[in-house]
């Protein structure tokens, strides 16, 4: 469960390392987001080694303090797949996406649930859906 000021780890090829949640994009003014939902994040820290390898137009986009949309792909809270089967990850992590839920990078690290690869095929193209 992700709420305001929750720190998350970005698991894509961008130079962003650590972010925090600013707003949960959900109807009915709910303040908690679960796995598979869209949030607005602010960049807190970046990896300078990867940042220098980025093109100049991407360096302007992924700087410290910029805001982006993100899709939550892993949380520490249990996710119930089917009746009686729970999945739990070790970290809260996100993938940075556009308004059309297309990832901004061309590679995603770590496992992603099979349900999300079916729900958003563009996410399944850039990642390996293991679980």
Image (tube, rainbow, N blue to C red):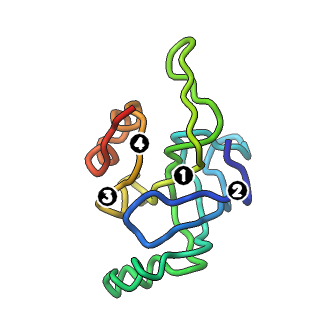
Label 3 secondary element: loop
Residue at x 65%, y 36% (from the top left corner):
77
Q: Nearer the viewer, residue 110 or 6?
A: 110
Mark closer to the chain start, 1 or 2: 2
Q: Earlier in the sequence, mark 1 or mark 3?
A: 1
Instruction: Name the residue that disc number 2 marks.
Output: 6
Q: Earlier in the sequence, mark 3 or mark 2?
A: 2
**Mark 1 highlights which residue?**
93
Q: Depth-wise, is mark 2 or mark 4 nearer the camera?
A: 4
Q: Which image quarter holds the C terminus?
A: top left
Residue that label 3 marks: 107
- The residue under label 4 is 111
Image x and y of residue 63, in percent: 51, 81
Vertical order, 61 against 115 (above or below): below
Residue 49 in which image quadrant: bottom left
Regarding residue 41, the answer to whether it shows in the image is: yes
């Amino acid at each position: 469960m992700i709420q305001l000021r929750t720190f998350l780890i970005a698991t894509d090829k961008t130079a962003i390392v650590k972010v925090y949640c600013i707003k949960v994009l959900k109807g009915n003014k709910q303040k908690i987001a679960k796995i598979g939902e869209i949030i607005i994040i602010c960049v807190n820290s970046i990896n300078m080694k990867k940042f220098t390898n980025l093109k100049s137009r991407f360096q302007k986009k992924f700087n410290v303090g910029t805001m982006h949309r993100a899709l939550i792909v892993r949380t520490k809270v249990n996710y119930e797949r089917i009746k009686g089967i729970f999945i739990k990850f070790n970290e809260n992590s996100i993938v940075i996406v556009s308004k059309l839920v297309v990832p901004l990078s061309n590679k995603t690290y770590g496992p992603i649930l099979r349900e999300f690869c079916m729900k958003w095929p563009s996410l399944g193209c850039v990642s390996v859906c293991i679980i």
